[in-house]
Amino acid sequence: MIQPAIPSNESARLAALEEYKIMDSLPEMAYDAITRLASQICGTPISMISLIDRTRHWVKSKKGIEATEIPRELSFCAHAILEPEIPLIVPDMREDERFHDHPFTLGQPGVIFYAGIPLVNPDGYPLGSLCLIDEKPKQLSEDQLQALKDLSYQVVMLLELRRKHFQAERARAEAEEARQAKARFLSTMSHEIRNALSPIIGSVGLLAMEEDSLTPSQRELIELLEFSSQTLHTLLDEVLDYGKLEAGKVYLEEIPVDLRSLTEKVIQIHQPLASKKQLQLVKQVDTTLPEKVLGDPTRLTQILSNLLTNAIKFTQQGSVSLSVGLLETTPERYRLRFEVQDTGIGIPEESLKQIFEEYSQASLDTTRKFKGTGLGLAIVHLLLSLHQSQIFVESQQGQGSRFYFDIAFPKTV
Ligand code: ADP
């Protein structure tokens, strides 16, 4: 018996094999179907899909044989891969000097006929072979040989699919890792900047209190400083909040919430801004609304506030309304609908979907005209996901917008 040689490009071949993560994987129907077909077409009792690693001939799929692996030195397929372009066909092993005294020929399983079609990957590396074994001498017809080549091509395609799957998974994992690194960086920077900003805001506040000793132009400058530093602070808060939400680090509270007083408070917070723009701020609360529900008042306030802030910001005249209605009562829950409607500039049809994405605004001049970060609605979207809910919007440019969502709150006991 002559032991199989080692291919000259062995280390590259082994590296290629590694990419498929196929060794020691579980049996799969797609490979088994090919082994069965090969056996049927060529009329042999035994068929295998084998892969050759550094030390082993490992069997991915087999018919008519028990062995799942054998040492590489004893493998016929390790001979087959030495000439990747040519099938290794041995009609009678007893007449071949490489195999005539091979223990598998002399003893069990009594291999007399062997045919191995190398499984050559697109880069030209032979990974193993699709092989057939019989206990008696045999010749393959041209058609049978062609069918075997076609089937081995199918095996390589299956392997390629597997490799692409792992490549895609790796790319996804790397992209996720990069995204997380970016989020961590953004969060750390926002923290640091916010910490540095706090004493600035404090000092500007103190300066502003010394009204008597300030000239009008100094007061103007201080007001500008106050406004800018507050805007920056809000932006940093939003970035941090969004980062926490996105990382799944925000959990909802479940405590009794009085929705009437919560909506009243939200309206009160926004009243000064609405009055400043001479907008009517309207609250409509269903009379059938339950006294209390179980919910997270802070997060609900944040959702409604974000929507109202936008509604007021993007409305020059007319009104902004907040309504809460009871949609349904089940034994355990109240299903409520919240709506924020305005008579503002509206949102172009093509922007309706993207406004809920982070850092996105309906049009390019929004930042210049209205300021903002493009994070408010992304935060609303994530907060509503935590409530197993989602936000809907209807809008007509120049007519106004209507944002609404439903939440099923548990009843208080
Ligand atoms: P920001 O308001 O900070 O820009 P948001 O995420 O809250 O960010 O909103 C994203 C964009 O959606 C806004 O920039 C604006 O273009 C559009 N938008 C949101 N609410 C309204 C509204 N009520 N009317 C018109 N446009 C709106």
Image: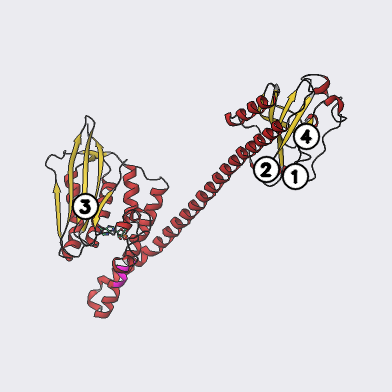
Q: Is residue 85 left or right of residue 210?
A: right
Q: Nearer the viewer, residue 141 or 299?
A: 141
Residue 408 x %, y %: 25, 38
The residue wearing badge 1 is: 11
Q: Label 2: how many residues lie within 10 Å, few (<14), some (14-19) or many (20+)?
A: many
Amino acid of disc 3: Val
Q: Label 4: how many residues lie within 10 Å, few (<14), some (14-19) or many (20+)?
A: many
Which tag, 2 or 3, sits closer to the chain's start? 2
Q: Are marks 2 and 4 in contact (CB under 8 Å)?
A: no
Q: Are marks 4 and 1 in contact (CB under 8 Å)?
A: no
Q: Residue at x 25, y 49 (%)?
A: 301
Amino acid of disc 1: Ser
Spatial CA distance of label 2 from label 4 is 17 Å
Which tag, 4 or 1, sits closer to the chain's start? 1
Ligand 1 occupies quarter: bottom left
- The residue segment tinted magenta is 224-229
- Residue 154 quadrant: top right
Which tag, 3 or 1, sits closer to the chain's start? 1
* In the rendered image, the vertical position of residue 225 relative to residue 183, given as above or below: below
The residue wearing badge 2 is: 121
Spatial CA distance of label 2 from label 3 is 59 Å
Q: Are marks 2 and 3 in contact (CB under 8 Å)?
A: no
- Is label 3's Cβ within 8 Å of ligand 1? yes
Nearer the observer: mark 3 or 4; the answer is 4
The residue wearing badge 3 is: 340
Q: Residue at x 71, y 36 (%)?
A: 128
Amino acid of disc 2: Asn
The quarter of the image holding the N terminus is: top right
Nearer the observer: mark 2 or 4; the answer is 4
